[in-house]
């Protein structure tokens, strides 16, 4: 499940993706435009900057901007940075696997095996979706380009 931290971070990234090249935005403005708590957004933006997604500049003409084009930023990377693994449960995670206390055999566990399929579907979409596509999704069927042939 996407946390508020992940949701707010994505909203801020979309806000920055919609700026003109070379333009920056202050956290206060991003918070107001997106109805986000500024103090929490400060922490989120720092994390995103430290992860290399954002660039910050102090002083006149300062603020935040994307560190690279929105077409080069994957939504899955942003979510993992803020919320950790995409898997719905720890035992289905590729990067943070943790066996459940009540599970005798994770390889045969039906819950885990089903959640691995869910994780793969989520990662398949989010790791192939760019921030540019995500930001442009207001009037489009966002998921259609990422669906497999199954209906």
Image (tube, rainbow, N blue to C red):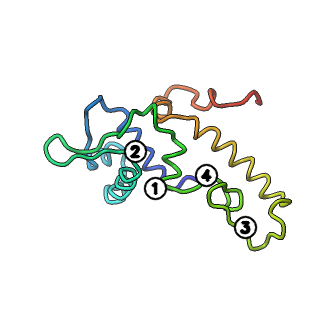
Q: Nearer the viewer, mark 4 or mark 1?
A: 4
Label 1 Cα neighbours within 10 Å, binned few <14 / some 14-19 / many ≥20: some
Residue to which mark 1 is pinned: 5
The residue to which callout 4 is attached is 86
SS for dot 1: helix
Q: Position of residue 116 (x, y in %)?
A: 74, 51
Q: How many marks?
A: 4
Instruction: For the residues labelled 2 and 4, say whether their Cβ atoms are less than 8 Å apart.
Output: no
The residue tagged with tag 2: helix, strand or loop?
loop
**Marks 4 and 3, how far apart in space?**
16 Å
State if disc 1 and disc 4 touch (CB < 8 Å).
no
Classify the position of the C terminus by image quarter.
top right
Q: Quadrant of residue 110?
A: bottom right
Sequence-wise first label, 2 or 3: 2
Residue displayed at 13% across by 43% down = 60
- Which of label 2 and label 4 is nearer to you? 2
- Label of residue 53 in the image: 2
**Mark 2 to mark 3: distance in Å?**
32 Å
Residue 77: x and y in percent read: 51, 46
Image quadrant occupied by the N terminus: bottom right
Seen from this angle, which residue lies furthest bottom?
101
* Mark in the foreground, 4 or 3: 3
Q: From the viewer's side, name the closer residue of 9 and 48.
A: 48
Residue picked out by circle 3: 99
Q: Which mark is first along the chain, 4 or 2?
A: 2
Residue nearest the observer in this picture, 3 or 112: 112
Question: How much space separates mark 2 and mark 4, taking CA atoms?
Answer: 18 Å
Q: Position of residue 49 (x, y in %)?
A: 35, 50
Residue drawn at x 45%, y 31% is: 71
Circles 2 and 1 in contact, beta carbons < 8 Å:
no
């Amino acid at each position: 499940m996407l946390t508020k931290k992940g949701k707010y971070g994505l909203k801020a990234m979309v806000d920055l993706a919609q700026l003109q090249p070379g333009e920056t935005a202050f956290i206060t403005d991003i918070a107001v435009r997106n109805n986000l708590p500024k103090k929490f957004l400060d922490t989120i933006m720092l994390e995103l900057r430290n992860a290399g997604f954002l660039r910050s500049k102090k002083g006149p003409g300062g603020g935040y901007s994307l560190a690279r084009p929105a077409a080069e930023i994957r939504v899955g990377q942003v979510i993992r940075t803020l919320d950790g693994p995409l898997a719905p449960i720890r035992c289905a995670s590729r990067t943070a696997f943790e066996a459940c206390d009540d599970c005798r055999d994770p390889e045969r566990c039906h819950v885990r095996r089903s959640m691995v399929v869910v994780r793969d579907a989520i990662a398949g979409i989010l790791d192939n979706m760019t921030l540019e596509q995500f930001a442009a999704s207001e009037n489009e069927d966002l998921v259609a380009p990422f669906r497999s042939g199954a209906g």
